Image (tube, rainbow, N blue to C red):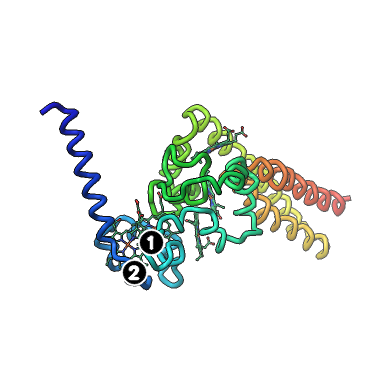
Amino acid sequence: MGGWRILAVTALMVGLLSRGAMAQAPEGEFADQECVKCHLEKSPAVVEQWRASEHGAPDQPVTCVDCHGGLHKLSAQKARPNGACIRCHDREGAIVHSYRTSKHGVIARLERVAWDWTQPLAEGNYRAPTCAYCHLHSGGHDVGAIITSRSPKARDKTEEVCADCHSPRFITTYLTTGERMYQIGLMKVREASALVERFRKTGPDEDALADMDKAYEKMKSVHLKNLLLGIAHQSPDYQWWHGHPALDGDLIRIKSIYMESAR
Ligand code: HEC
Ligand code: HEC
Ligand code: HEC
Ligand code: HEC
Ligand code: HEC
């Protein structure tokens, strides 16, 4: 038998087997513990990845039912659109807004009605990525797998996701520029931190120090995060409006408080 025949027969068998397996999926409705128990047998990787992720936090997990609903009918379709995530990930917050102001978010918003949500989130099935396309790529349930600050493997994983739609050269350029842009953000925060500490030691007046601390806190916890999300979610708005210019504003404010009191 020629190689192509073996391939064709294997493909047919895989097709039949997977259809057979789907036919076995009981209708439900199921409670969350039932999903976990049965899928620990049927698809152990899914359950293990979910458990190891932030969503699997034992005290207050984001459950299977939260994303898929309690029935098998349409269970995957329900989880793919952005609504499944935005419901919890603050509609008005920077996480969602940075995505919405990206080209991906704009395309998804304009075209999502025409998309066939029965299809897996994979190459060729969608023109632009949804939240789940990037964070649950190829059905992986470790939603943090592409968070570079967490794991050295994340950059490879991210490149894999982008490669469904972009050329290797575009991806390398974009990600490397992003990393450099974030390093510059960190430098600005370090410069501000050094000024605040020097100011604190020289015995300044309380009000000026409180103003400085406030500006520094905002810089670190809001504007640096905006920059990170601008890079992560490819939003020029978050990179160049809510990100770097906002960090510059904070640094100028901190410097001017310092200079005023030094006079
Ligand atoms: C008694 C066993 C059993 C229980 C309970 C169960 N499932 Fe399944 N599930 C299956 C089988 C079998 C399949 C088909 C083969 C596969 O994908 O693993 C399946 C498939 C799926 C799929 C893939 C569907 C697709 O279109 O690709 C999802 C998503 C899913 N189940 C989610 C859930 C959720 C959520 C629950 C709880 C509400 C649940 N399952 C409860 C056995 C179960
Ligand atoms: C029921 C609420 C809920 C739903 C639905 C939900 N999330 Fe989450 N998500 C959380 C909580 C809670 C956390 C952990 C705390 C935090 O980061 O806010 C989290 C964390 C995350 C993280 C950070 C992971 C890390 O390692 O830091 C990502 C990424 C994420 N979710 C993506 C998604 C995506 C994509 C979807 C939709 C497919 C989704 N979430 C649906 C509540 C939810
Ligand atoms: C944050 C939302 C979210 C949570 C929580 C979640 N899933 Fe999923 N799941 C998805 C999305 C989105 C897909 C579709 C992935 C795709 O199309 O590639 C999916 C796909 C699946 C599939 C099909 C996998 C495949 O490779 O085709 C199974 C089975 C599944 N989920 C089971 C579960 C079970 C069991 C749980 C609970 C332990 C769970 N999911 C928790 C969002 C979620
Ligand atoms: C094009 C791919 C892509 C899309 C689409 C996407 N994300 Fe992300 N997201 C990322 C990357 C990459 C990071 C990690 C940045 C880093 O290295 O810390 C991230 C980070 C996050 C984080 C963690 C932020 C933190 O506090 O550290 C959350 C939560 C999140 N995304 C949720 C979402 C939600 C919700 C959506 C949809 C509204 C979405 N993402 C769409 C790629 C994507
Ligand atoms: C499902 C397909 C798909 C995936 C996956 C995807 N993109 Fe895109 N991306 C697009 C489309 C379509 C556009 C809009 C057309 C264009 O500008 O090329 C776009 C635009 C962009 C832009 C804006 C380019 C510009 O000219 O304004 C950047 C930056 C970008 N993507 C980066 C990424 C990164 C980084 C990843 C991986 C984390 C990624 N994309 C994943 C489809 C995708």
Please tell me which residue is depicted at 61% across the width and 45% down the height of the picture. 110
Check disc 1: other Cα within 10 Å, few if <14, some if 14-19, many if 20+: some
Task: Give the camera-side residue of 40 and 215.
Answer: 40
Please tell me which residue is depicted at 57% across the width and 44% down the height of the picture. 111
Disc 2 and disc 1 in contact, CB within 8 angstroms: yes
Element at label 1: loop
What residue sits right under mark 1 in the picture? 73
Q: Position of residue 232 (x, y in %)?
A: 56, 45
Q: Position of residue 85 (x, y in %)?
A: 52, 58
Task: Give the camera-side residue of 239 and 196.
Answer: 239
Element at label 2: loop
What residue sits right under mark 2 in the picture? 28
Tell whether 263 sits left or right of 99: right
Of labels 2 and 1, earlier in sequence is 2
Amino acid found under the numbered disc labelled 1? Lys
Task: Give the camera-side residue of 32 and 178.
Answer: 32
Residue 256, can we see it? yes
